[in-house]
Structures are given as structure tokens and as C-alpha cells.
Amino acid sequence: MEFTAIVDAKARHQAACAVVGVYEDGDPGKAALHIDKQMGGWIARLLKAGDFSAKLGESLLLPTPAGAAAARVLLIGLGGRAAFGRKPYRKALQSAAQALGKTAAADATVYLALEEVADLDAHYRARAVAEIFCAQLYKIPDLKTGAKPKAPRLTSVSVAMADARAMKSAAEGLRIGQAVGGGLALSRDLGNLPPNVCTPTYLGSRAQALAKEFSSIRTRVLDASGIKALKMGAFLAVTQGSHQPPRLIVCEYRGAKQGSAPVCLIGKGITFDTGGISLKDPPAMDEMKFDMCGAATVLGALRAVAELKLHINLVVIVAACENMPGGGAVKPADIVTSMSGQTVEILNTDAEGRLILCDALTYSRRFKPAAVIDVATLTGACVIALGNHFSGMMSNDEPLAEELLSAGVRADDRAWRLPIGEEYADQLKSNFADIANVGGREGGASTAASFLWKFAKDLPWAHLDIAGTAWLSGAQKSSTGRPLPLLVDFLVRRASGV
């Protein structure tokens, strides 16, 4: 999809389709006023007759409108003008993308970014167009043998702005939004693939493919012997019940001067999680293919950063393996030695994500990072606490926590801060090892993060628990790619020094 910012406040641009907003109670949007004049008052007559209510998200296609510069006009309901803000704007864009995808239009001019949206400047209004259009037109990689649905014909979108200054800001927003869209497509594809395809080895091959696509990325993939040489005993304990070999994937992006401290992103890459010996209940176990969405997200963020050529150094670390039962699987009461040298008593083999992440955190120290952020579908407790709306965020660094929370607000991919500390770490005390991997049901998301906190001492570190936001269930079952928009916004700000 190609996105372009243009100056066209009076809706005169020729296109296969013009997308204009209309408010309720016969209140036309900025572009709708001009197009209505070109069409001799057709839109006004529709509104007066009640044929288009303009409720938020409603759409109506006007084919071959006489007098208009565009071959089609797509009306999008914006709801009440007084209530038109960030969320209604995004919903209007989603409706526009869905409706355009059903037409034969190969190009379109979107005029919705001309409307005033509280707290969204031209940059973010345009960025939202690119992100939402890419997301709405995304297709799940299915393995069905029947006829595939036809791909949308839409390949080019122009975003109209009021003047040259707004156009320049919008162009940068579109550039970032398109990169986010590309990163989301990669991360969603990886999450949606079946676990017999998306194995740890496959994740490694996709990371290597990124290095071939972008010369700024260097990728190394370590096998079981390489992981063993690093003395990652906690990581190896999780994988020992599986026939699929583990992989430690390390990608380095160099966009800043050599020696500049990198940001490290760590992704949980459990390509299938049965729970191990502590076997999960059968219902919805198929969704445990999504337990590698943290890995998928950080690889997608890496792709977006490389496409944007950000002036930042970035290291992406993915610990990838399966968590399976079997004669060789790790058992409750086993004690393992982590890369840090700390011993861990494994009381529940389904608390495996923290085991692979603690070794990845220790490994990240060799890069002397400016910040470390791990991303993981870590706990069901986080879903209970926050539902599917917010990602959980815990941190030992106040400025880093504020950066991430603010990035989530800007990107409409919000996180909510949850507590960590000695109170929760005390629940992880063991009679037999330095630390246990679980501490009871109470405060489960915080005890899991506090386990990681024990391995992140002296690192500026944050943890994003995405168990509730990484995928959708039910009829819309699929990966969401979250929190990639948050991460990219954070990295863009870091790179700009703002």
C-alpha cells in the first residue's frame, strides 16, 4: 500500500474514490461541504431525506457522482461533532478502510484527516490513516484448500491536508504509520501461523530473512549447544521435553554511532505452550500457539525501525522453544541454575516464560543497554486484572516507565502500570533454591514481573505483559500485533531525542 500526503482542502483531487466525513443532524464535514457543491447538493438532499444518518461508522457509497472530481464518493458517519475525538476518528477510519476494501477502487483520497480531532495533530491523524488501513486490509495466512478471497484492489491512498505545513507533518506520520503497518503484518503473520509451521527454527529463519532484507540488521541464531555454552540453565529446562530444538535469536540494528548504548527488546518465544508437566486444561489450548507473540512483536518492531532507518541502536533478543510434557520434561520441584548463577526451584512448569526471559535478561547485559524492555504473554493474572484493553507494564525505572506509558497513549496502544517490589518477591521464597518460579495466585502478574525484576537489578528495565492484548479469541481469533505501535512510538521518540 502506498500512502501520500497532499494539499487539497477543497476536495478537487481526482481519484477512484473520495472518502469524506459527515456529522449527525445534517452537519457535513469540511470536504463534504465542497463535494456537495460540486454535486449540486446531492449529499444535503440525502441527509435531509434521512437516507444517511451519519451515525459513527456508518458508510454509504455514491457511485459515479455527477460533478465530483472522484469517480466515487464514500460517505463516512462521524457521529456528533461535539463527541468527535480520538476514538471516533479511529472508528471512522476503520469503517472507511472496510468499505473501500469492498469496492473496485484502486486508489482513494481520504479527507477525514481534515477534521479537527482533540489531542491529534496532522502527524498523528495521518499516521492513524496508514496504520488502520494496513491493519484493516490485513489477511490471515490460512491453509484452507478452497478458493481464496480476492485481495482488495486498493493500492494507493492520498491523505488530504489543509496546507503545505500540515502536509509535511502528515507525510512523516504516514511514513511511520506505513512502517508500523509492515511490522504489524510480520508480527501478526508469525502469531497466526500454526505451531507445526512456526517453530523455534522457523522464527530463527525469519529473523535471518530480515538481515537479508535490511543491511542495517545483523542476525545470529544460537542452537542448543550455543545456549548450553552460555549456561542458560533456566531456558534449557523449559525446552527439554520437546523434540523441537530451541533457538536464541539475536538481532542487532545499527542506526546510531558505534558505541552508542542500544535499547534492548526481549521477546518471549514459546511457539507452543502445553504447560508442560503442569498441563493446561484442554479448552482453548490451541490459542497457546500465540505464546510466542512477544517474540513476534519485537521482530516486527525491528522491521519497522529498519524501514524507518531510525538513528538508534537496537538489539532484539528472542528466546524461542516449546514447552511440552514428556519423559524428559522438567518436573515440579526440579532446581535449575540460571545464566546469572541464581538457582530456581520450578514449582509449576506452566510458569515457563519467566524462566526463558530471566536468562535472556542476563544475556542482554553484555550490550550495556540504555534500556531493556521484555515483551511477553506472561500471565493469565494480567488478563484478569486488565482484560483485553491494556497491556500490563512494570518497571524499576521511573523515566522509562513514563516514556512507555506516554508512547502507548500517543499510539492508541495503551499500557497500565502495575506494581513490583520486595513484597511480591517475598512470595517467591524457596526452602531449597535462591528463588521459586511461582508465588501463589494472589498478585500473579506482579509476582511474575518481580521474579524478572530480581534478574534485572541495575538495568533500566520494563516488562510488558501482553497476555490480554496479543490476540483475539472467538470468531475473530487472530494475533493483534500489540504492543508494536507502542514500541515503535517509543523508539521513534528515543531516536529523535525528544
Image (cartoon, rainbow, N blue to C red):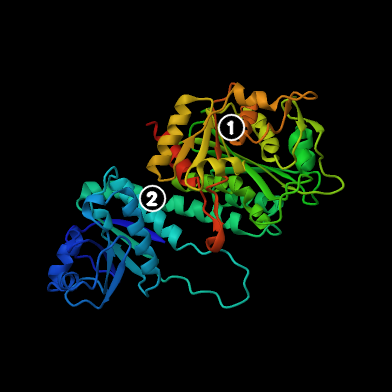
| Percent of width and height locating residue 79 | 26, 58
Inspect the image, locate mark 1, and give the three-letter code of the amino acid beneath it: Ser
Q: Earlier in the sequence, mark 2 or mark 1?
A: 2
Q: Secondary structure at mark 2?
A: helix
Q: Is residue 220 above or below residue 498?
A: below
* Residue at (75, 34) in percent of width and height: 234
* Residue 114 in view: yes
Q: Secondary structure at mark 1?
A: helix
| Percent of width and height locating residue 43 | 18, 70
Total marks shown come to 2
| Percent of width and height locating residue 466 | 55, 44
Q: Quadrant of residue 334?
A: top right
Q: Quadrant of residue 91?
A: bottom left
* Residue wearing tag 1: 446
* Residue at (61, 46) in percent of width and height: 295
Left or right of 402, for residue 298: right
Task: State the residue in front, 51 or 251.
Answer: 51
| Percent of width and height locating residue 457 | 61, 22
Left or right of 19, for residue 155: right
* Residue wearing tag 2: 175
Pointers 2 and 1 in contact (CB under 8 A)?
no
Inspect the image, locate mark 2, and give the three-letter code of the amino acid beneath it: Arg
Q: CA separation, marks 2 and 1?
A: 37 Å
